[in-house]
Structure formats: structure tokens, C-alpha cells
Amino acid sequence: MDTERLTLRPLTESDVDSLRALHADPEVMRYLDPAPVENYLGDGFHAAVETATGRFVGWFELTGTGVAELGYRLHREFWGRGYATEGGRALIDRAFTTGDVQRVVATTMFVNAGSRRVMEKCGLRHVRTFHVDFPDPLPGTEYGEVEYALTKEEWRRAQGERHVADGKS
């Protein structure tokens, strides 16, 4: 799948070194528990490659049917460029137009303001703040986790509003 600036394709074994490099950055992993990179090679996980340069930007996830979970992780050098929003929106649009997805959800730590902003830009709305007892909590855990969501109906309404704003009624 191609967006304006990204190519999203399934993650493969050939991406393992790129995944390890991404997950080795302590700032990228600041709000995340580490998991073996091989966990990201399944269905619904996509490598994000910068179309103009062919560079590995990071990965996106949209997994599940009925209710799908959105996730993303990008190299720091690509933060603040709109890539997370661009890739997230593309996957959400595809899920609502081609799949059985009725709702997209995403979660992060309350203190992860950057990721929360991406969720909002993708059209997701704050649903709840909740607390989880972790055996080895990360700094900021005391403020809780947040869940954001978007239903297919909300997405359809937003698409209609976007078309009207663009003059495509």
C-alpha cells in the first residue's frame, strides 16, 4: 500500500535487523515494554519505507477483525514529520473500506503525549483512562494508560465532512 510519502508492506524476516535497530533506541522504547522483534512478523504488521529514499521508517500494526488494534513505532529521525498520522490513517481507511472492522482502538501511556496526538490526528477519540498493575512498571505508569477509538460510523461521517470541505459533495 502506498501513501503520499510511504510504502507500507508486510514485515518479513529480512526486516529483523531494521526492527532490532529501531527497538534498540531507548527513546523509541521509552513508553514500551520490549518484546522479541519476531513478534512483529505476523499478519497485520507493516514495514513503513520512505518512498523517496527507500529508508526503513518503522512499522505499523492494524490487527484484528471486528475490533482492530492500531499501533506504530518509528525511528526518532522521522518523528514530527506526520508519518505516523499518514500511515495510521491509511491503515484505518483500508480497514473500514475493505475489511470487517467496525472499530479501531489504540492504547498508550497517559504520559505519551506524542502518541496521543497521533491517535487524535487519525480521528480516534479518548475513550478512557485506566490503570494496570505491571510487575516492573515504567516511569509514568502511575498516571495510567489511555484508550482511544474510532467506529466505522464515526469514520464514515468524517469522510463525508472531509469531502464537503474539499468541495466534493
Image: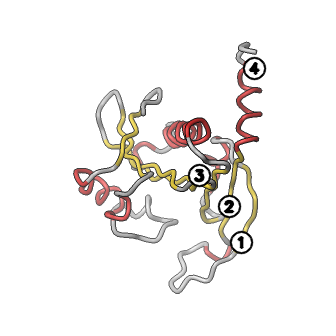
Q: Could you tell me how many numbered marks the image carries? A: 4
Kindly report the distance in space between the C-alpha atoms of the residues bearing marks 3 and 2. 14 Å
Kindly report the distance in space between the C-alpha atoms of the residues bearing marks 2 and 4. 29 Å
Q: Dot 4 corresponds to which residue? A: 165
- The reply to whether callout 2 and callout 4 are in contact (CB within 8 Å) is no
| Figure quadrant of the C terminus | top right
Q: Amino acid at mark 1?
A: Phe
Residue 52: x and y, percent?
Answer: 34, 27
Q: Earlier in the sequence, mark 3 or mark 1?
A: 3
Question: Which one is in front, 154 or 32?
Answer: 154
Q: Dot 2 corresponds to which residue? A: 147
Disc 3 is placed on an element classified as: helix
Q: Amino acid at mark 2?
A: Glu
Q: On residue 130, which mark appears? A: 1
> In the displayed structure, would residue 142 be above or below residue 72?
below
Kindly report the distance in space between the C-alpha atoms of the residues bearing marks 3 and 1. 19 Å
Residue at 39% x, 48% y: name it: 58
Kindly report the distance in space between the C-alpha atoms of the residues bearing marks 4 and 3. 27 Å
Q: Dot 3 corresponds to which residue? A: 114
